[in-house]
Amino acid sequence: MPTLLRLENEMEWILAVGYDADTVFGLDAKFHALPDNWHSMLRDAIVITGNTAPDMSYKELLERIAALSYEAHGALERVIMDVLDHVTSENAMDTAGMMCGINGVPIEARWHAAEAFGGHENLLCNICTNKEIHSRLTHIFLSKYIEDGNDETHGIGWKIWGALGVGPETGYAVTEQSAALILQKETQETLKRLFAKMFENDRAVCAEIQACLEQL
């Protein structure tokens, strides 16, 4: 059975997928043979030995999704708006970096949340016995977070990167151009509008979660 391994001085996990004689093969960014002395470098391992019943109900899982209604979540939106109102030539690069860093969290986290709640091949689907609830949450997560043409969070994240002149060509890191762009009033207003919509999407998802919880 495939096993997750992490070797000494490495942060990334490797999926051990097979072996040939004494050679173990792993999969991370590519398929490759592990070093002969991998066992002496072993730092962590996750070994699945069998099946077990879920130790958390679907309702308990939903109740744990508190970040979308947490006080600090709303406070972050206010901080973003305030920072964008006070961009100067001295802080432009730091401000661009801040906006880029904040954006990197929802563009990834919301995408994976939508996949987790919207997919039929994952564990969340299996522990949700109320198919109406599952259907409602699937719709709200997909439409607000990843479906094209809905002002979805993933698409908004790409627009934020675009407004900052950030993308694959910059390694998703800010540049001097980002600092120049964020000094422009038009860019500041664009970022405010995009971040506001991102938070609005979170509030819509949170409201639907709360409504579903009342039925569970």
Image: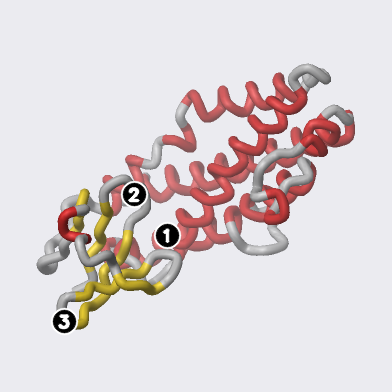
Q: Position of residue 205 (x, y in %)?
A: 52, 47
Q: Residue at x 77, y 25 (%)?
A: 92
Q: Is residue 71 above or below residue 158?
A: above
Alpha-carbon distance for marks 3 and 2? 25 Å
Alpha-carbon distance for marks 3 and 1? 41 Å
Q: Residue at x 25, y 61 (%)?
A: 4
Depth check, front residue: 197 or 43: 43
Q: Are marks 3 and 1 in contact (CB under 8 Å)?
A: no
Q: Secondary structure at mark 1?
A: helix
Which residue type carries mark 1?
A: Phe
Can you tell which of label 1 and label 2 is closer to the viewer? 2
Which residue type carries mark 3?
A: Ala
Q: Position of residue 170 (x, y in %)?
A: 70, 49
Q: Position of residue 204 (x, y in %)?
A: 57, 45
Can you tell which of label 3 and label 2 is closer to the viewer? 3
Which residue type carries mark 2?
A: Glu
Specify which label sits upstream in the sequence, 3 or 2.
Answer: 2
Q: Which residue is mark 2?
A: 10
- Circle on res. 21: 3
Depth check, front residue: 29 or 117: 29
- Circle on res. 210: none
